[in-house]
Structure formats: C-alpha cells, structure tokens
Image (cartoon, rainbow, N blue to C red):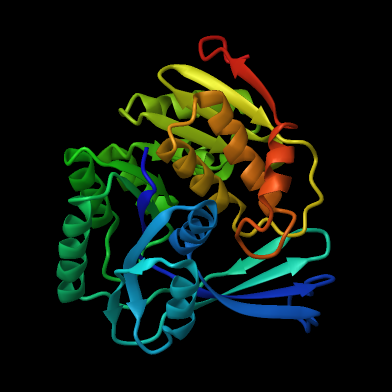
C-alpha cells in the first residue's frame, strides 16, 4: 500500500468556465457566471487524489508568465511541485456549460517545448521513478512533444516496473497504446476513434477493448457516462452502473474516474469495491462544478448504490 503518486500534465491549461442558458453559435451568448482556475487533466487528477489523502507530486511543463494560480493550487493541495518552467504563458481553455448539461470546449494550443525543456523533464521523471510506483500521465501534448516521444516515456517507466495510468486521445493515445501502459481509460468516443468506426453499445465497446488487451495492456477501463464503467483485467469484465445523477457539469468527471482508479489500486482495494468506489467518485463529480471531493460521507453512500455485474468477455452479452 502506498500514498505516493506522480501526476504528469504535459499541456496544462487555465480553464475559463462559463455557465449560460444556451450557447448561441454565431452570435452573442450571455454568461451567467464564470470562473478561471488551474487545470489540465493531470492537474485535475492530482486535486482529487490529494483530497482522498494521497501524497502527490506534480510535473509536466508550465509557462512562467502566468503560473501563479497553479502555484497556489499546488500549495493548497500540499503537492510537491516538480513542473519544468518554460518561457511564455500557459494556454487558456474555454468551457461553456449550458443549462441542459451540454459542454462546448474551445481548446487552445499549448506552449512551445524546447529540447532543453524536454531534457530537464526527462531527468525529473527518472529521479521521481526512484521512489514512486504510480504515475498518471493525462491530457494532450504541447507543441514540441510528439506522440512517439510521449510513448517513449511510458515505455521507459514500464521497463522500470512502474504502473503508468495513461489517459489521452487521438494521436497521443494511439502511440501510447503500443508502449504498454498499465491502465488506460478511453471513453466510448476515444475507443471509436481507435477502431475507426462508431461504437454504439457496451458490447461493441468490449469488443474494441479486447483488441487493446491483446497489446498487453493490463487494465482497460471504458467510461460510458450515464451507462457506467466497464473494466477488463485478466480476461474478466466488470460493469459498474451508477444511479441517475443530477448533472451540473461533466467537466473533470473522467479525470475523477482516473483518480479513483489510481487511489483504489494504491490502497490495494479488492476489484469489486475498487470499481464501485471509482465509479461513485466519478458520478459524484458530475453534480458539481470543478473537481474535488467535498464530502466523503456522500461518496460512501453513493458507492452503496452502484450496481455491479460481471460480464462474459467471450459472449459479449
């Protein structure tokens, strides 16, 4: 059992989130309320893990010009800050949340990473690998970091016997899948991109995930929103189904699921309590704006309501 974990956010962002009744594309939309906060998938995972009681070290690339909100968040979390500072400003991403729960993301490109920045990051990563077992690598890639380079870092950590939880999309995901991460968490949309066709049912998602298991990936967790979470490990499928939640915002729900999966493994939970815990944590995340665990009691109550069923991988029923 361990409390120590490293989260890697190669392309963090300041998230500007606005709540509005309806997004009027091509004309003026009025935002009722908004906030700006330090984010990025790995940063979100770190925040949730910190709330759960983990000893978190954060790393990746961070723009020097507007780092204050990140520094404050890391200080509030009690996280160890090992981010490599880069000249320039970290990007700002815009998330528009409509009253019906629809979220429109406008994601900007990240900062330019130089070979010197990469060398510094690699040295940091190897140093952290000396006394950490769990690494969460989450999010997109900045300019200067190729999917192949990212995959080489996963491969290096894997060769050192580290457990890498990898959550990305598109080219970065495609390259990383061949580097044998220990756990991946594609959603149904990302799985569809991987196989090149739309997947419309849990059975089709299981079939696609099976192809990934053949690559030697030990844990494949498919997040399907309201349809719940499916986990393939050692040829066995588990399907955790949450109750219907009052959705306020889905932003960060996937990151929260990754954090729950990581914490469950760090605490050496048995498989069934682990998947119900992570699913409950993620389900709770959609009822709030922003990531974090405000109420452990509420989490425990919700975990009891998660319906769990084993699924036959052979029959895909």
In the picture shown, does residue 5 fall above or below 251? above
The picture places residue 278, in percent across and down from the top left corner, at 58, 40
Q: Residue at x 34, y 36 (%)?
A: 182
In the picture shown, does residue 205 fall above or below 119? above
Q: Residue at x 43, y 67 (%)?
A: 78
Q: Is residue 24 left or right of residue 79?
A: right
Q: Quadrant of residue 245?
A: top right
Quarter that holds the N terminus: top left
Q: Is residue 7 left or right of residue 263?
A: left
Q: Residue at x 18, y 62 (%)?
A: 122
Q: Residue at x 70, y 35 (%)?
A: 227
Quarter that holds the C terminus: top right
- Using the rendered image of the protein, determine whether residue 210 is visible from the camera's viewpoint: yes
Q: Is residue 62 left or right of residue 50?
A: left
The picture places residue 241, in percent across and down from the top left corner, at 69, 31
In the picture shown, does residue 284 fall above or below 232? below
Q: State the count of labels.
A: 0
The picture places residue 277, in percent across and down from the top left corner, at 60, 37
Farthest top residue in view: 315
Farthest bottom residue in view: 65
Q: Quadrant of residue 233?
A: top left
Q: Is residue 250 left or right of residue 159?
A: right
Nearer to the camera, 289 or 112: 289
The picture places residue 76, in percent across and down from the top left corner, at 50, 72
In the picture shown, does residue 242 fall above or below 317? below
């Amino acid at each position: 059992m361990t409390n120590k974990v490293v989260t890697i956010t190669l392309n963090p962002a300041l998230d500007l989130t606005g709540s509005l009744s309806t997004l009027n594309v091509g004309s003026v939309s009025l935002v009722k309320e908004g906030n700006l906060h330090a984010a990025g998938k790995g940063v979100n995972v770190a925040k949730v893990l910190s709330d759960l009681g983990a000893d978190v070290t954060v790393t990746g690339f961070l723009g020097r010009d507007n780092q204050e909100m990140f520094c404050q968040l890391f200080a509030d979390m009690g996280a160890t800050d090992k981010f490599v500072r880069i000249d320039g400003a970290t990007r700002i991403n815009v998330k528009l949340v409509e009253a019906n729960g629809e979220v429109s993301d406008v994601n900007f490109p990240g900062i330019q990473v130089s070979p010197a920045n990469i060398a510094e990051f690699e040295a940091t990563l190897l140093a952290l690998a000396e006394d950490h077992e769990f690494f969460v690598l989450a999010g997109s890639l900045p300019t200067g970091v190729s999917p192949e380079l990212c995959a080489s870092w996963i491969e290096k950590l894997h060769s050192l016997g580290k457990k890498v939880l990898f959550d990305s999309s598109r080219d970065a995901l495609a390259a990383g899948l061949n580097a044998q991460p220990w756990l991946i968490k594609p959603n149904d949309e990302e799985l569809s991109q991987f196989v090149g066709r739309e997947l419309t049912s849990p059975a089709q998602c299981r079939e696609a995930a099976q192809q990934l298991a053949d690559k030697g990936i030990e844990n494949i967790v498919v997040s399907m929103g309201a349809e719940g979470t499916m986990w393939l490990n050692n040829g066995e499928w588990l399907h955790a189904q949450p109750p219907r939640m009052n959705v306020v915002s889905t932003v960060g729900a996937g990151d929260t699921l990754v954090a729950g999966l990581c914490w469950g493994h760090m605490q050496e939970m048995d498989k069934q309590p682990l998947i119900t815990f992570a699913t409950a944590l993620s389900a709770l995340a959609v009822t709030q704006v922003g990531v974090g665990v405000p109420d452990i009691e509420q989490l425990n109550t919700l975990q009891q309501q998660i319906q769990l069923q084993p699924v036959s991988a052979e029959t895909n029923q």
